[in-house]
Amino acid sequence: MKISCEVVLDLIPLVKDGVGSSDSSSLVNDHIKTCESCRSEFEAFEGVKNEQPDIKDEKIIFDIKRSIFITQLIILLAGAIVGVALSNSMGMFYNFLIMPIIGGLGYVTFKKKWWLVPALVFVLSYLWQFISGIVEGGFALEALYYPVFISSIYTFLVFLGIVISELLHFTFKKER
């Protein structure tokens, strides 16, 4: 089959880079046997070195994982702060949804250090409630024990989310 020199010149870079099909390679090789100008282009292209930096897959995967971890951490902290901030309003009942989601996301984000999430939620909630109680009503005995009650409820809800995530992880792991 006779093909034009323009087509061969278009195919030469693909063949030289090893990304052309076997049909393209055979067409180019057959054509350069008979065409002197295309053969000289083919040989001249050999001398051209395509400077591409070495791409390290491990570094790219590490960067992607780090980016996902940071995003999850930001969502986790934002959710915890919003949930704790809703404690002194009628919106506190949204925490029945927010806190288990935080627990599930914490389980996925921190894997073996999942226990940090309930601890963080307890401390954050306690401090928020304690400071709010002092600001609103001054220091009283109630300012010490009321935050423990609310913080314990939130911590329980976070644990509930962790348990649900663990069960889902176990279930989907078994299916593989």
Image: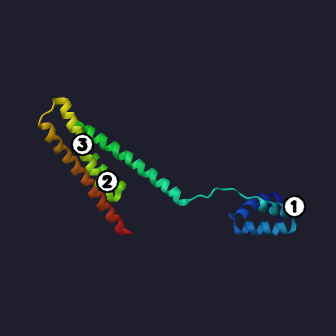
According to the image, label 2 marks what residue?
104
Q: To which quarter of the image does residue 112 belong?
A: bottom left
Q: Which residue is mark 1?
A: 37
Q: Quadrant of the N terminus?
A: bottom right
Mark 1 and mark 3: Cα distance apart in space: 78 Å
Amino acid residing under circle 1: Ser
Report the residue marked by disc 3.
Answer: 125
Tell me the SS state at disc 3: helix
User: Mark 1 or mark 2, which is nearer the start of the sequence?
Assistant: 1
Q: In the figure, 55 relative to 152: above or below?
A: below
Q: Quadrant of the C terminus?
A: bottom left
The CA distance from mark 2 to mark 1 is: 66 Å
Mark 3 is on which residue type?
A: Ser
Q: Nearer the viewer, residue 112 or 161?
A: 112
First in residue order: circle 1 vs circle 3: 1
Which mark sits nearer the N-terminus, 3 or 2?
2
Q: Residue 20: image x %, image y %?
A: 70, 64
Q: Nearer the viewer, residue 172 or 80?
A: 80
Residue 126 position, x and y percent, is 22, 42
